[in-house]
Image (spheres, rainbow, N blue to C red):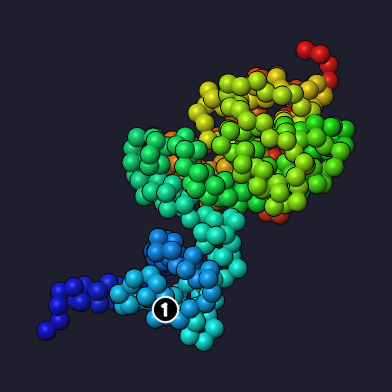
Amino acid sequence: MVCASAARCRLAHVKHTGLLAAPPGAGLADISRLVDSYCRTQALLSALELDLFTVLDAGPAAEKEIRSALGLHGRGLRQWLDLLVPLGLLERDGDRYGNSPEAALYLARSGRQYLGDFLLKAMVPSLGNLSTALRTGQAQVPGGGMAAVADDPALLRSSIAAMDMLTGDIVPSLLAAYDDWDDHRTLLDLGGGRGSVAAGLVAARPHLSAVVLDLPPMAPLFEENMAARGAAGAAAFRPGDFFTDPLPRADIVLLGNVLLDWEAEQRRSLVRRAYLSTNPGGALIVYDHRLRGAGPGGQETLTLNLLTLAMCGVSDYTLDELDTDARAAGYDAVEHRSPGSPPRPVVVCRKSARPA
C-alpha cells in the first residue's frame, strides 16, 4: 500500500515532468522554468544556511565528511551536492566536493566579498514578504529596515559587497558618458560606500582628487578596501549624512545607486544639495541600474525595483523624473547616456560656468 505522502509526491512528479515535456505552449514551460529556478535558488540558500561553503573553504571533502561536518541526515545529500556542481558553486573531483572560485570569494565566510549575511538577513526575508510590501508599501527588512544595517557590522560588510557586485565595473561607462573628465580636478562620491568606484575613476584619471562621503560605520570598510586594492591614498573618506551634514564642493559630484533608495521629496532634496555642492562648470553624474525610461523597463530593471520596494519601501524613478528634479535644482543641461555593453544608464547634469 502506497502512503498518501508518497502518492502526492508521485503525482507532483508526473505533473512537473509532464509540464516540461508537453509541447502545448511556451507559457507552461516558462512557468516550469520559474519553479525550477526557485528550487535551484533554495539549494543555494540552504548551502548558505548550513554554512557548506565555509566548511569546504578548508578544502574538498567527501560526502560522508560533509554529512558529519554539517550534522545532516544524509538523505538527498548527494543530489543536493551534485546540483550545486552544474550551478557553478561546487567543483567535483572523484568523490570529493570543493568550492568553486566564485563560491570561495562570495559565499564562504572568509571570502573578502562574502554575500551570505546580506542574502540571508536582508534580501531573502524581504522578498519573502513581497506580498506584504505590495499591500503596505513598507520595507520588509527585519529589525527596522535598511537603516538598521549599519548597526550590524557583519551585515553591513556583506551588504556593501552586494552593492559593489550590483555596480560591477561601472567605471568604463562613466568615463565614456562624460567627455570633460580632463577639465576637472575634484570628485565627490555621495554615498560611495567603500570607495570602489572612486578608486577606479582615480586610477583611470590620476589627476583627480576624490572624496567619498558616507556614514561613519563605513570608514573601516573604506580603509580596508583601499588597502586591498593597493589604492591607499587614492581617495579620502569623509564621514557624514548627505541629507544633513555640510557637503564639500567638487567639480564632479557622483550619485550611484543612491537616489532610488529614497522617497520622492528626499530625492529632490539630495539633487538640490548635490547642485549646491557642484562647482560652476562642473556636473552631477547619476548612474543606477533601476533608472528607466517611459516604458516599463526590462526584466532586470523591474526585478531590481521590486527588490528596492521590499527592502527600502520605495520603488521606481524614471529618467524623466530625474530630468525634472535636476533642472529644478538649477542644472542647465541634462543628458541621458547609455554607454557600455550591455548599456548602462548614466545621466549627466551640467552646471553652468556662469555665476547664478
Q: Is residue 19 above or below residue 142?
A: below
Quarter placement of the N terminus: bottom left
Q: Is residue 160 visible?
A: yes
Relative image position of residue 266 (x, y in whole percent): 54, 25
Q: Is residue 145 above or below residue 85?
A: above
Q: Where residue 12 appears, x then y in whole percent?
A: 27, 72
Residue kind at label 1, given as amino acid type: Glu
Instruction: Pick out the residue farthest to the bottom.
Output: 94
Q: Pick whichever, 138 or 102, lies toward us.
A: 102
Residue occupying image coordinates x 76% and y 35%: 210
The C terminus is located in which quarter? top right
Q: Is residue 15 above or below residue 299?
A: below
Q: Residue at x 59, y 39 (%)?
A: 218
Q: Nearer the viewer, residue 88 or 109?
A: 109
Q: Quadrant of residue 238?
A: top right
Counting every numbered tag in the picture gives 1
In the foreground, 272 or 31: 272
Q: Quarter of the image holding residue 41?
A: bottom left
State whether residue 202 is above or below residue 325: below
Count neighbours of disc 1 (C-alpha within 10 A) and say few if under 14, some if 14 to 19, many if 20 or more. few
* Residue visible at 76% across and 47% down in the picture: 231
Q: x, y percentage for residue 334?
A: 72, 29
- Residue 198, percent from left and from top: 72, 41
141 relative to 245 in the view: left or right: left
Q: Check the image and name the residue furthest to the left.
A: 1
Q: Quadrant of residue 52?
A: bottom left
Residue position marked by numbered label 1 in the rendering = 65
